[in-house]
Image (spheres, rainbow, N blue to C red):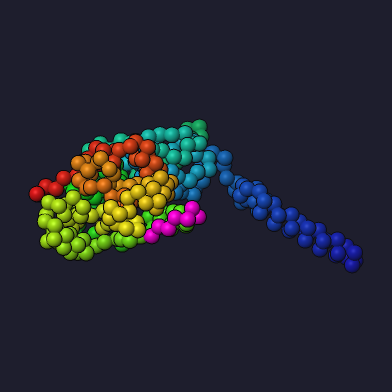
Amino acid sequence: MNKNRITILVVTIFTLGAIILMTGSTFTENHLQIKCGALPLETSEISTAKPILSAKLAKNSLKLSWTKVENADEYKIYRSKKRNGKYKKIAEVTADTLNFSDKDYKGKRKTYYYKIKAVSRSGSSIEHIYSNTIKKTVYKHKSKVHGVTYIDGILIVNKTYKLPKDYNPGTNSEAYKAFKKMQSDAYKDKINLFIASGFRSYSYQKNLYNRYKSTDGKDKADTYSARAGHSEHQTGLAFDINNPNSSFDNTKESKWLAKNCTKYGFIIRYQKSKEKITGYKYESWHIRYLGKKLAKKVTKSGKCLEEYLGITSKYKQR
Ligand SMILES: [Zn+2]
C-alpha cells in the first residue's frame, strides 16, 4: 500500500465516522440503531419511556396531564381510593389527547390516586405501559384539610369557619409578591401604600381581640375584630393597608386601592352594605388575596366572598 492510498483510506474512515456521528445526533433513534446493526424498533412497538402524570386542581375539577408516549394509540385513565386498591377506569382518550379533567367527585372521600395507561395496538398484539401513580386530594364544595376549611378550593376563614391554633403559615409569599407589584405600580400614580398589619398568629390575635373586648365589650369588639382562630390575618393572605381604621376611607389611597386591587388578585374583603353577611363593618383597608382570576370574578359579581361562595359568617356561640 502506498502513502496516497493510506491517506485516502484514513480520510474515508474519518468521513464515514463523522457521517455516522452526525446522522446519529440529528435523526431518530431508529436510524441510529439500524446503522449500528442493532434491531430497529418496530413502528408499532410502544416506547419504554413511561408517561409522566401530573395533576392540578381547578375550581370544579382535577386536571390531569401527561407526557406523550411514542406510538401510543390511546390512553386509559384510572382512579382509586387507595394507592394499592382497585383502580377503576374513568376515561379513555385518543393518543393526541394529553390531558383530562376529572369532574366526578362522588362519594365521601377526598383523596384519590390516579394513573394512566398508554396503549399501543398493532394487529392482534396489544402493548401497554403505566405511568407513575399520583395522589391528589380533591376539593369538593366543602372540604377540611388539617382543620382548614376550603370552599370550592378557596381557603375560607370567617365567623363560621375557624382555623386551628397551630395553623401558622406566615405571610403567603404569592400574596406578598402581588402586594409589592401593586405597591410599585401605585407609586407611579403617586400613591403610597404599605402594609400596616399582615400575618397574625393565633395567639397574637387572641391578645388583640381580648384587649378590644375589655375596652369596648364583646358585642362591639365582634363587629371589628375577629376572635382567635377566626381572623383572616392568620391565613397570611390578608393585609391591612396604611391606616386600619375609618380615617382611611375616602382617601386617595383607599380610592386607588378599591379601584385597582383586583388587578393584582386582591378584594376589599369587608364591603359597605355587606356587614350583615360578612359579619364585619366596612373595612376599606383590609384586602384579601384570591389570585387574579378569582378576584376578578368575585369583584365583577358585586358579591362579598360569603355570597359568592354561598356560605355564612356567624359565630356558633354568642
Ligand atoms: Zn384586617
Where, by quadrant of the figure, is residue 63 drawn? top left
Q: Quadrant of the N terminus?
A: bottom right
Prevalent SS, magenta region: loop
Q: Is residue 203 above or below residue 48?
A: below
Which percent across, then down, holds residue 277?
21, 41
Q: Give percent across and percent down for residue 264.
A: 42, 49
Q: Quadrant of residue 272?
A: top left
Q: Is residue 189 magenta?
A: yes
Q: Is residue 59 left or right of residue 13?
A: left
Percent x, y of residue 287: 33, 51
The residue depicted at 44 percent of the width and 40 percent of the height is: 99
82 part of magenta stretch: no
Measuring 38% from the left and 55% from the top, which residue is drawn there?
175
Q: Which of 95 and 38 is in front in this view?
A: 95
Q: Which segment did they paint magenta?
A: 188-194
Horizontal arrangement in the rendering, residue 137 relative to residue 161 (left or right): right
